[in-house]
Image (tube, helix red, strand yellow):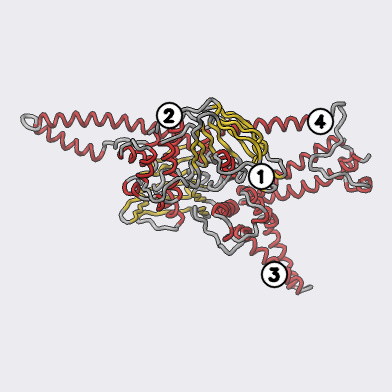
Amino acid sequence: MAVLTVENIEKAYSGRVVLDGISLQVQKGERVGLVGPNGAGKTTLMKIIAGLEEPDHGSVAIARSADMSYVSQQPRLDPQQTLRHQVELVFEHLRRIERDMEAAAEQLAHHASGPEHDAALERFDTLQTHFQHMGGWDMQRRVDTVLHQLGFKDAEMDLNISALSGGQKSRAQLACMLLESPDLLLLDEPTNHLDMPMLAWLEQTINDMTDAAMLIISHDRYFLDSVATRIIDLRHHQIEEYSGNYSAYMAQRAERRLAQARVYDQQQAYIAKQEEYIRRFSAGQRARQARGRKTLLERFKTETAVSAVRNDKSRMILNLEVQKHSGQEVLRLEGLCKAYGPRVLLNNLEFNLPRGTRLGVVGPNGSGKSTLLNILAGLAPADSGEIHWGHAVSLQYFRQEHQDLTPDNTVMQELHAARPMASPQDIRDIAALFVFSGDTIEKTIGTLSGGEKSRVAMAKLLLKPGNTILLDEPTNHLDMDTCQVVESALESFDGTLIVVSHDRYFLDAVCDQILAVQPGENGRAGWELVKGGYSDYLNHLEDKKKRLAQESRKAARVDKRGEPRRQPAKNAAPPKPHAASRAHAVSPALQRLSIADIEKLIARHESDLRDCEQSFADPAVAGQPARLKAVNEKYERLKVELAQAMAAWEIKSEE
């Protein structure tokens, strides 16, 4: 069933066509990725579907009774509301029921008996049943769980929206959408401002929303690989549709381009043959046939012939051959430490980088990734430790702030300064790879947006690379095609890279080692170095998790003497005195179990409770009252069973 139907949408601004005859459908349960170069009209199309803009022509139809939620790049939130209250507005229907319950309770207090009392009691009972059925008792838990998963601390939940950063506002808007659990989700760059743990949680949450229809604009190719079931490519005012995720789209697109190129070459050969016939026999005995062929040829050109395949800038490779190589050892760190107050970012960091290494640095927001690059570049001091750069290292640093650009220079001048021997046309061709063409190449740096400055800085770096490059979020503000330009260029780079990035697809394409950093309090920060790209790092984490689980199961069985272990489970409370006096609260069946069996039971109950708590934040559960009620009932039952098991353990441990 189609939840969204778009028919023949057209849109132009000041005569400039943006959308031309766009038609598409999104079915129930589909997760459709909308991709295309910057400025292609993706956000315009999304706003038209959301009803925030009117098309010049065409229509948008949303299935009857379907709820729609739009997560925009510019959050629409009440600046005077607190974060918690803003998100809780999602449950306003439950708040109304709660207020009605309070009113019914007041009526009960006012009428001690009689028909009014009976009517109020019946109303209160009906409202309470409905409130519980809709998950009202777990409303606060669901709000807190989603906000915590999106990186908010308890202290931030009572801040006004006006006090939040742009990234926090985007995450607050995303929390509202997930708790609403609508039938149709319109998501415009939902992964902005999310670190990798948040991204993994969001991907799992979206994949679990099996009944919702989604249209997703995203430059995060790894995200689209994880969640998309279909890709729509919007470029040159029109769309092409592809089945599968982003990787499937790339393979199908390449096949289509190749097939189109073959057909185009065949048709050009046919056209050339017909034109030669027309030229040779336009006069004489075959003139009539020549005129007939000319008419047919003109019709063929206008109605049948395919267009030439447009140049794919992702295939144009900038050659990053290093002019002067460094020594074999590029960098050696010894005991590097950095902290801000009690928060330790880097703790005894030690590794060597040989020439040609491509190191990706990952970790949650605030874990010290950019701080590490600033320390390596000499822009910030370490608290302790040694940094040894190798012989003849020529260092370049791509920073998010881009202070190395001259505000009064034009884009053309800034790029030409990086490669003075290049011709003006070569500079224009390179600028076009980074979405600068026409008049935009003559704009001054000071008038550019943050994203435009980022693209200029990246183009400059690739025009004149050193033998060692530090990159801090290099793909921010780049569209997918331009990301491929950068990736292709870095493939030809034979120097050393150190890259901080949230772009997991980029890390897979570029890096051969991953440094994962984790901050901590009181010196408990950690780090580890893993060979391979980001996917290899994820596999390493999964293997590590399995090993720890196996070790935990072995440790829980028996000690070296083969006797049952008498230590409580990890989260078990310490034994209390007078356990025998609590024996009446424990069932005879529990009392008959061994202490080892009770420990296993406690561990299982704790695990099941954690699963229930995660389910409360799952939109697929929250949006279905029957499932939510079942989970809530299971949660309450497990709490009672855990309490009984803990009491049984206390009794057994004191025998």
Circle 1: residue type: Ala
Kindly identify which residue carries mark 4.
557
Mark before the other along the chain sequence, 4 or 1: 1
The part of the image, by quadrant, that contains residue 313 is top left
Circle 3: residue type: Ala
* Residue at 37%, 46% in the rendered image: 411
Mark before the other along the chain sequence, 4 or 2: 2
Kindly identify which residue carries mark 3.
103
Q: Is residue 409 visible?
A: yes
Q: Nearer the viewer, mark 1 or mark 2?
A: 2
The part of the image, by quadrant, that contains residue 557 is top right
* Residue at 75%, 74% in the rendered image: 110
In the rendered image, the vertical position of residue 413 relative to residue 319, given as above or below: below
Which labelled disc corresponds to residue 339? 1
Q: Nearer the viewer, mark 4 or mark 3?
A: 4
Mark 2 surroundings within 10 Å by alpha-carbon count, few (fewer than 14), some (14 through 19), many (20 or more): few
Mark before the other along the chain sequence, 3 or 1: 3
Q: Is residue 92 visible?
A: no
Q: CA distance from mark 3 to mark 2?
A: 80 Å
Image coordinates of residue 606 in percent, x first then y, are: 76, 42
Q: Furthest-left residue in view?
A: 284
Left or right placement of residue 366 versus residue 321 in this view: right
Left or right placement of residue 509 versus residue 91 in this view: left
Query: Could you say which is closer to the camera, residue 142 or residue 299?
Result: 142
